[in-house]
Image: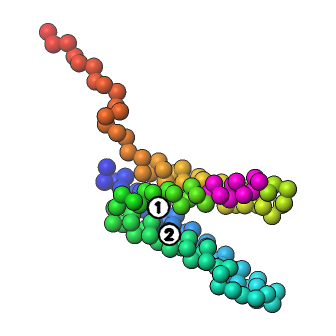
Amino acid sequence: MRILRYLRLAWVLGINTYVIYLLFGLAETKWRLYHLLNAPQDWHEFRFTGISALILACGMVSEVLNTRIAKYINFGYFATVGLFFTIFGLIGRREPEALIFVPQVGLPALLIALVTFFAYWKRDPRRAPPEVPQNQA
């Protein structure tokens, strides 16, 4: 069981770090685009990046500390983001910009949520099939 804990820890730290890297990379690209377009740059445009990074960092810290809330933070973030962007992309399917969110953000986030769900899933020994008693002669 200890090896599964270390594999889950590596998965959560790796995925969350990579997503934070992607979030800040996209924020930098957006910042440069605003600069090129001479558009006003407001910090409110980047609050999603900061809030997402904070949630993912809390998920990493809670996983390192092995708290019970870690599974809800790590699974919940990716499930929420995946469902939001998938539904957003499917509702706005007439707009090609909205449809881009489904394969680029929605489905990968849902896949990460699925893998994270199974990483936290523990088999309950009470639900195991009952053992058949052997006849003693």
| Residue 36 in view of the camera | no
Q: Residue at x 80, y 64 (%)?
A: 97
Q: Position of residue 40 (x, y in %)?
A: 76, 88
Answer whether residue 88 is magenta in the image. yes
- Give the residue at the far top of this rendering: 137
Mark 2 burial class by Cα count in 10 Å: few <14, some 14-19, many 20+: some
| Coloration of the structure image | rainbow
The furthest residue to the left: 137
Residue 99 is covered by the magenta coloring: no
Q: Position of residue 83 (x, y in %)?
A: 63, 54
Residue 131 sits above or below residue 53 on the image: above
Percent x, y of residue 11: 46, 60
Residue 56 locus on image (x, y percent):
50, 68
Q: Is residue 114 above or below residue 130?
A: below
Mark 2 and mark 1 lie on one chain; the one further toward the N terminus is 2
Q: Find numbered disc 1 in the image and state the secondary structure of the residue it sits on.
A: helix
Q: Give the side of residue 89 with respect to residue 4, left or right.
A: right
Q: Which quadrant, please, contains the C terminus?
A: top left
Amino acid type of disc 1? Ile
Q: Main secondary structure of the magenta part?
A: helix
Real-space Cα separation, disc 2 to disc 1, in angstroms? 7 Å
Amino acid of disc 2 = Ile
Q: Is residue 55 left or right of residue 24?
A: left
Residue placed at 85% from the left, 56% from the top?
94
Q: Residue at x 43, y 56 (%)?
A: 71
Tell me the magenta residue range. 82-91
Residue at (67% x, 75% y) in the render: 26
Residue under label 1, please give it.
73
Is 24 left or right of 129, judged from the image as shown? right
The residue that disc 2 covers is 55
Figure quadrant of residue 109: bottom right
